[in-house]
């Protein structure tokens, strides 16, 4: 037992042959990579992102929006009724706003809603996508299409400059996916 312990202790204290002291130049690997450093292709973000929403969007929604708008955007979060938070799932509200108007409200704030200008533009764009997914008319159309076995019509997309989106009777939207905690 003692020889094994002694051998392990000596091996752990040995310096590997390929290990060298860190130098400040090693840190500058993105602009001027060294020969032994990992090369990262900025055009290749790795595996394609899964369809739907990314975890960062869900976390941004949960941290910034659910206190007032609630998990499903109905304005029923803990502070929602007191602040008269907008029901983002209301088809009439959805059809009356463009994606740009929703993004501006998130970024700049509106009424009692504070500005979330510190969120990256990409996150704001994904939050707009999430808000659009909450449209009860869209969800109803998807449920009807799924029941009939056909593809769902594009109900509840961003309204056109002159358009009005049809508004079938609303139904309860599905809950938001949980963050995977990565």
Image: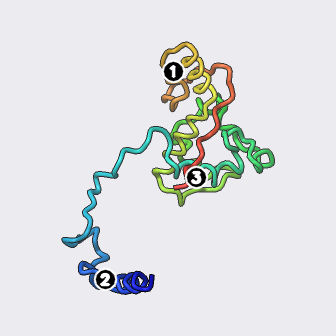
Residue carrying label 2: 22
Spatial separation of the CA atoms under disc 1 and disc 2: 57 Å
Q: Quadrant of residue 91?
A: top right
Spatial separation of the CA atoms under disc 2 and disc 3: 36 Å
Element carrying mark 1? loop
Extreme right residue here? 82
Q: Residues within 10 Å of mark 3 (few under 14, many from 20)?
A: some
Which residue is at a point 53% across and 42% down the rendered structure image? 128
Which residue is at a point 62% across and 23% down the rendered structure image? 140
Residue carrying label 3: 59
Q: Quadrant of residue 127?
A: top right
Sequence-earlier tag: 3 or 1? 3
- Up the image or down, 23 lies above or below 64; here it is below
Please tell me whether mark 1 or mark 2 is closer to you in this view.
Answer: 2
**Colour mapping used in the image:** rainbow
Q: Is residue 54 left or right of residue 168?
A: left
Spatial separation of the CA atoms under disc 3 and disc 1: 28 Å
Element carrying mark 2? loop
Residue 159 percent across, percent down from the top left: 52, 29
Residue 94's disc number: none
Residue carrying label 1: 152
């Amino acid at each position: 037992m003692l020889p094994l312990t002694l051998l392990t202790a000596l091996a752990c204290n040995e310096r590997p042959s390929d290990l060298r002291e860190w130098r400040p130049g090693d840190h500058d690997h993105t602009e001027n990579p060294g020969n032994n450093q990992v090369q990262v292709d900025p055009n290749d973000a790795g595996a394609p992102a899964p369809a739907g929403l990314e975890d960062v969007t869900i976390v941004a929604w949960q941290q910034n929006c659910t206190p007032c708008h609630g998990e499903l955007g109905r304005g029923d979060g803990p502070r929602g009724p007191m602040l008269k938070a907008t029901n983002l799932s209301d088809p009439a509200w959805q059809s009356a706003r463009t994606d740009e108007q929703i993004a501006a409200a998130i970024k700049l704030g509106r009424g009692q809603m504070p500005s979330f200008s510190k969120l990256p533009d990409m996150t704001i764009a994904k939050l707009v996508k999430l808000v659009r997914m909450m449209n009860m008319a869209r969800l109803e159309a998807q449920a009807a299409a799924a029941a009939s076995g056909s593809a769902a019509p594009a109900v509840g997309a961003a309204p056109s400059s002159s358009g009005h989106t049809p508004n079938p009777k609303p139904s309860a939207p599905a809950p938001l996916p949980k963050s995977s905690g990565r």
